[in-house]
Structures are given as structure tokens and as C-alpha cells.
């Protein structure tokens, strides 16, 4: 039988499981919002704990929080930063507006653990109070957007940038590997002038690199924190030195160049940085869909499609057709990117919900951006390692398609003009004869001239 203790808040008494660190306000959120079973990720919880440790250190230095309490709060927060007590953060993503429940979940867990550190009991808030001590000089309204900034910035450096760099490295390898492979180009899915297979991969590399450059430009706004703005941006109840000291501590703990925002009102009214990052993640998803769709098309077959490239076989593709191999890694990447694009729509819609001094929809904004970073990073790594690295060129099939391409006729324009060249292409299509055969047959060129003019190497 489950055992409970009685916890209290300003609304009265609440039954809380005996073994948990959180208190009444967290339990009310659990009771009120049984929505999805989804929780904000550890990266966000860690960011919250960094804020609480930094705030306690700043309040201690300002003389507003006694050293004993401050040190116990810092120790409890550091335990959370190091991965302890994850099971104590139980509030659903779809929770009270602005993330008040999320903020109080962390405040209560830290206060309860700090009480233990001081020799008291779990849930005894008389020693360290979640609001008066752990939340000192803070509000949900400035700590949640600060946690969004810290967690997103951290995940860019820990997860996303390494995955992008890994993908760029292998795309460059493929660009070099396929440089000598000349193939039929295609525009509108119709024959076009020749192109190097390596040049197609160079195009993919350039698209991914452009997004990384955009992210690097946008990240500087993540480093501006409005911590210290408190309830509405005025800094009420906070020491004049608190914000500078707390943000300095955050920068030290994260090893990232966080600074104080020059406009705390803007910081709290809007979620500009999260919107920017989400938009760039959407752009990355669009480019990855292009790459995955191209590779699926180029590898289609193996007998009835283009079959210009061969993908690594990673698992059987059909439960009924023996021997069938599907481009599952590419399909997986497409699904991930579809989710990222959907997440961006959610972020945009939630951002529109900002009114007057605050955006109440911050929890779902933070969740969706962080989820996008996680799944697109993992998706890129899987694609790079399990698909892209092992992709090879089917040069025999590539030559076959190139020899049949009617767009080689483009090289005739300077010699016989557009209209005559179009007539030759039409006749080639209708008769099945090659361009070279028709040019020689009509006496327009000698065999040597036709060979030279229609040489794909001269067209790239």
C-alpha cells in the first residue's frame, strides 16, 4: 500500500507520496494535468538547476541569503546537474501557463533535498523554503525563458553541431569519391545536361553548411539572459547586483558566454531566440528531406528504377517479398524531419500566445525546440553512419543513362542552333537512334566531331 505524507501550500493540504522530494504545488500539477506523460528533458531540468545554484551563490554574495542555506541549495542543485533525482521531475509538458509548476517542481525538490543536507527531513520546508529561499530574487517569468536559452545553447554545442559536422565531413568525402563520376543531370525529373555525381553531393554539403552558419549567427541571441527581470522585467525584490552575479555564475558553470540582456522587458515578453533556432531547425529539416528524397530516387530499383547509387542494406524490407531491401534509413530521416517541421509550427503558434509582459506558452516552446534538436541530431548521425558512409556509385548504370540522355543535345546549340538541335532531339526520341548516330547520318558532323562535341566531359 502506498504511503503518503501531508504537504501544505497556500491552498491547503495535499497528499504527497512519502518517498518523493517534491511538495504540494508539484502534486497539484500532477493531479491537474494528466495530459501526455511527456516531461521536459534532462537538458532543461539541468538548466533549471544551474539557475538555482547560480541564484543561491549570487544571493549569498549579496548578503540576502545566509551561507548555510545557500550552500545546501547549491549542493542539492549540483546533485540534479549531475543527473541525480531525475525521477522527481514529474510535471507534464502541457502544464500551467509560463511553467510555474515546472519552476515549483525544481524549487520544491531542491528545498527538500537541502533540508536533508542540513539534517532535516524530506519535505520539511521550515529549514529551506522553496519560494523564499530557492526562488529568492526569481520568478517563473524570468527563470523559465532563461532555462530555455541555457538548455538550447547547451544542446547546440553538445548534440547538434557535432552531428552537423560529422555529416559535413562525410558529404565532403563523398564529393571527392564521386568527383570523376559523370552522370545525366535531371531537372523537373527530366533529362538535363551532365553533372558530376560528386557535384550533387557538393550541393548537399553547401545546403547543410548554410544552415549551420545561420545557427551560429542566431546563437548569439541565446547568450543574452533576462534573469533578474523577475516578475515583469523590473527586477522587483532582487538585489541590484544579483543579476550580474547570477549570470556570471551561469557562464562559469556552462562554459558558454552568457551575458545580461539589455532589455529584460523584451526578453520576458517574447521568445525570439527560440523562434529563430526553431526556424533554422525547420530549414535544416527541409534540406535533409531533399537529400533523403534524392538518395531514395537515385537508388530506386534495383531493376526498375534509376539505380545510379547503391545504399547499404541494413535490414529486410518486406514481410512478404523475399530479398526486398528498402531505403529505411532515408525513410527514417524523412519522418524525423517531418516531426521537426511540425514542432516548428507548434513553436510559432505558441509564440503568438505572448500577451503583455509574458508568454504563458513557454513550456511547450522549450519542449519542442529541444525535441527537434535531439531527434534531428540523432537522425543525422544514424543517416551518416548507417547510410551515407556506405553509399556507392553504380557506374555501369550511370553510363547507361548518360548515353541515353537527350539533353546532351544542348552541346549542339553553338554549332547548329537551338531549333535544329531540338529537331535532332525529337527525331532521336521518336526513332530510338542516338544523337551521335543521327548527326553522322545527316552528315552534320564527322564521327570524330560528333564524339568530341557530345563528350560529357566537355559539358561540365
Image (cartoon, rainbow, N blue to C red):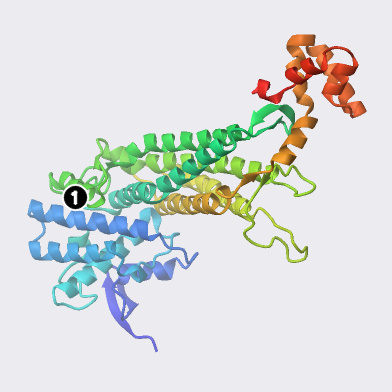
Q: Position of residue 412 (x, y in %)?
A: 76, 15
In the picture shown, does residue 53 fall above or below 24?
above
Across the whole image, how many numbered discs are drawn on residues?
A: 1
Farthest residue toward the front? 448
Up/down of 58 relative to 214, above or below: below
Q: Is residue 172 left or right of residue 160?
A: right
The C terminus sits in image quarter: top right
Give x and y (percent) for residue 51.
25, 54
Residue 222, relative to residue 27: is it above or below?
Answer: above
- Residue at 67% across, 20% down: 458
Query: How crowded is the residue under tag 1: few (<14 C-alpha within 10 Å), some, or many (20+)?
Result: many
Q: Is residue 390 visible?
A: yes
Tell me the element at label 1. helix
Q: Residue at x 20, y 54 (%)?
A: 54
Q: Quadrant of residue 224?
A: top left
Q: Residue 277: x and y, percent? A: 43, 41
Percent of width and height locating residue 407? 76, 24
Residue 388 against residue 261 in the figure, above or below: below
Task: Specify whether 411 is left or right of 353.
Answer: right
* Residue reaching furthest to the bottom: 1
- Give whichever of 282, 419 is nearer the camera: 419
The reply, left or right, for residue 318 in relation to residue 104 is right
The N terminus sits in image quarter: bottom left
Q: Choose top left, top right, bottom left or bottom right for residue 297.
A: top right
Asked whether residue 281 is in view, the answer is: no
Residue beneath disc 1: 249
Residue sitting nearer the eye, 329 or 276:
329
Q: Residue at x 24, y 45 (%)?
A: 229
> Where, by quadrant of the figure, is residue 308 drawn?
top right
Q: Nearer the viewer, residue 261 or 315?
A: 315
Amino acid at each position: 500500500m502506498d504511503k503518503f505524507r501531508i504537504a501544505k501550500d497556500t491552498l491547503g493540504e495535499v497528499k504527497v507520496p512519502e518517498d518523493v522530494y517534491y511538495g504540494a504545488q508539484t502534486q497539484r500539477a500532477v493531479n491537474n494535468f494528466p495530459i501526455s506523460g511527456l516531461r521536459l528533458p534532462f537538458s532543461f531540468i539541468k538548466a533549471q538547476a544551474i539557475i538555482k545554484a547560480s541564484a543561491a551563490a549570487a544571493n549569498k554574495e549579496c548578503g540576502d541569503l545566509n551561507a548555510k542555506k545557500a550552500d545546501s541549495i547549491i549542493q542539492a542543485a549540483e546533485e540534479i546537474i549531475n543527473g541525480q533525482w531525475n525521477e522527481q521531475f514529474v510535471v507534464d509538458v502541457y502544464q500551467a501557463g509560463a511553467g510555474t509548476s515546472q519552476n515549483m517542481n525544481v524549487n520544491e525538490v531542491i528545498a527538500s533535498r537541502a533540508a536533508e543536507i542540513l539534517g532535516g527531513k524530506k519535505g520539511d520546508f521550515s529549514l529551506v523554503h522553496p519560494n523564499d529561499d530557492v526562488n529568492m530574487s526569481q520568478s517563473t517569468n524570468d527563470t523559465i525563458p532563461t532555462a530555455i536559452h541555457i538548455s538550447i545553447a547547451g544542446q547546440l554545442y553538445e548534440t547538434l553541431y557535432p552531428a552537423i559536422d560529422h555529416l559535413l565531413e562525410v558529404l565532403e568525402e563523398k564529393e571527392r569519391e564521386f568527383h570523376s563520376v559523370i552522370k545525366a543531370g535531371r531537372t523537373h525529373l527530366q533529362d538535363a545536361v551532365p553533372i558530376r555525381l560528386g557535384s550533387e553531393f557538393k550541393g548537399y554539403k553547401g545546403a547543410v553548411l548554410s544552415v549551420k552558419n545561420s545557427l551560429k549567427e542566431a546563437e548569439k541571441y541565446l547568450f543574452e539572459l533576462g534573469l533578474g527581470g523577475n516578475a515583469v522585467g523590473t527586477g522587483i525584490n532582487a538585489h541590484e547586483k544579483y543579476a550580474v552575479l547570477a549570470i556570471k555564475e551561469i557562464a562559469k558553470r556552462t562554459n558558454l558566454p552568457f551575458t545580461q540582456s539589455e532589455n529584460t522587458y523584451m526578453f520576458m515578453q517574447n521568445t525570439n531566440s527560440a523562434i529563430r533556432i526553431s526556424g533554422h531547425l525547420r530549414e535544416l529539416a527541409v534540406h535533409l528531406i531533399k537529400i533523403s528524397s534524392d538518395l531514395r530516387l537515385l537508388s530506386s530499383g534495383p531493376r526498375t528504377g534509376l539505380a545510379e547509387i547503391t545504399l547499404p542494406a541494413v535490414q529486410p524490407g518486406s514481410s512478404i517479398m523475399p530479398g526486398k531491401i528498402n531505403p529505411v534509413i532515408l525513410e527514417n530521416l524523412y519522418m524525423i524531419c517531418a516531426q521537426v517541421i511540425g514542432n516548428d509550427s507548434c513553436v510559432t503558434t505558441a509564440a503568438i500566445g505572448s500577451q503583455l509582459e509574458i508568454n504563458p506558452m513557454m513550456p511547450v516552446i522549450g519542449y519542442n525546440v529541444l525535441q527537434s534538436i535531439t531527434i534531428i541530431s540523432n537522425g543525422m548521425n544514424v543517416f551518416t553512419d548507417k547510410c551515407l558512409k556506405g553509399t556507392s556509385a553504380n557506374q555501369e548504370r550511370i553510363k547507361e543513362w548518360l548515353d541515353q540522355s537527350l539533353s546532351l543535345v544542348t552541346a549542339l546549340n553553338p554549332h547548329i542552333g537551338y531549333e535544329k538541335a531540338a529537331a535532332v532531339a525529337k527525331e532521336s526520341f521518336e526513332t530510338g537512334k542516338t544523337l551521335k548516330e543521327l548527326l553522322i547520318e545527316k552528315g552534320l558532323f564527322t564521327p570524330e566531331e560528333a564524339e568530341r562535341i557530345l563528350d560529357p566531359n566537355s559539358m561540365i
